[in-house]
Amino acid sequence: MGRIEWIDKPLHSKIRASIPIATVDLLVVYKHGLLLMLRNNEPAKNLWFIPGGRILLGEPLEEAVRRILEKEARLTPIKIEKKALCPTSGLTTTTSQYSTV
């Protein structure tokens, strides 16, 4: 078996910075309203945002939506619809209808 060699930290950082990160943003609709959340932490503390986050390696999109919505808003989606594509990468943005947990 071949020998494993590690790259140095600066090169690793440069490689990581050039790799796109798959994310999903959620437009959560309920009774004709859109869910906005107020950030409690930096960065952007005290600013409004829509829930979203990174898609984990190998994670299906719908599982990412469920995980992120549960983690950030303690909600469970009852319907997930893909609504838009990111024009540069082809990733999808979703909307969700939800019920409380």
Image: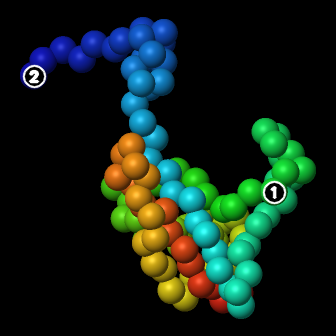
Quadrant housing residue 60: bottom left
| Residue beneath the point at 59% across and 84% down | 97
Real-space CA distance between mark 1 and mark 2, rounded to the nearest whole angstrom: 53 Å
Position above or below: 79 against 11: below
The answer to whether one can see residue 47 in this image is yes
Q: Are marks 1 and 2 in contact (CB under 8 Å)?
A: no
Residue 11 in the image: state x and y as whole percent.
42, 11
Q: Residue furthest left?
A: 1
Q: Residue furthest right?
A: 46
Position above or below: 30 against 55: below
| Residue beneath the point at 51% across and 86% down | 79
Residue 77 in the image: state x and y as whole percent.
57, 82
The answer to whether one can see residue 63 in this image is no
Label 2 environment density (alpha carbons within 10 Å; few <14, some 14–19, many ≥20): few
Find disc 2 in the rendering and name its residue. Answer: 1
Q: Who is closer to the viewer here, 49 or 68?
A: 49
Task: Report how many numbered discs are placed on residues in the image.
Answer: 2
Position above or below: 93 against 43: below
SS category of the residue bearing label 1: strand
Q: Earlier in the sequence, mark 1 or mark 2?
A: 2
Residue 57 in the image: state x and y as whole percent.
38, 50
Quadrant housing residue 15: top left
Q: Is residue 16 left or right of residue 43?
A: left
Question: The residue under label 2 is which amino acid type?
Answer: Met
Residue 48 tag number: 1
